[in-house]
Image: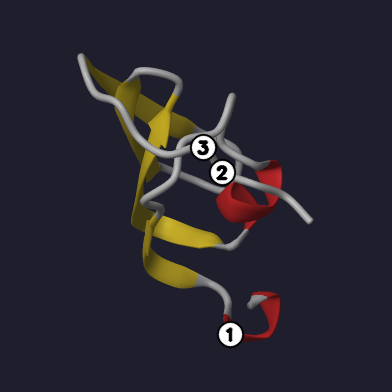
């Protein structure tokens, strides 16, 4: 939904190998993204136009993210 961006919060309930760059681009400065990546939950905070802070919380299992 890029036409509604930027977003304060983005949440994914399916695990991918990495956080898609399109999701990062749609996050506003100060916004947070929560997504499972492999076996961890990642909390990504956009600090500025080019800077992100990632916090990893391991030990989780999720259904895989399917592209298509």
The percent coordinates of residue 44 (x first, y second) are 37, 38
**Of the pair 67 and 7, the residue shown nearer to us:** 67
Distance from disc 3 to disc 2, alpha carbons, whole Å, reads 4 Å
Q: CA distance from mark 2 to mark 1?
A: 22 Å
Q: Quadrant of the N terminus?
A: bottom right
Q: Residue at x 45, y 71 (%)?
A: 7
- Residue 40 horizontal side relative to residue 16, left or right: left
* Quadrant where the image shows the C terminus: bottom right
- C-alpha separation, residue under disc 3 versus residue under disc 1: 25 Å
Task: Label 1, secondary structure: give it.
Answer: helix
Say which mark, if any, is on residue 64.
Answer: 3
Q: Residue at x 57, y 48 (%)?
A: 24
Does residue 60 appear to the left or right of 51 in the view shown? Answer: left
Q: Which circle, 2 or 1, is nearer the viewer?
A: 2
> Which residue is farthest bottom?
4
Left or right: where does residue 67 sit relative to residue 44? Answer: right
37 lies above or below 24: above
Furthest toward the front, the residue is 63
């Amino acid at each position: 939904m890029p036409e509604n961006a930027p977003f304060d919060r983005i949440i994914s309930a399916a695990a991918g190998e990495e956080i898609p760059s399109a999701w990062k681009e749609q996050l506003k400065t100060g916004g947070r993204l929560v997504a499972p990546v492999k076996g961890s939950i990642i909390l990504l905070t956009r600090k500025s136009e080019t800077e992100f802070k990632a916090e990893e919380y391991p030990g989780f299992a999720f259904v895989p993210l399917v592209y298509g």
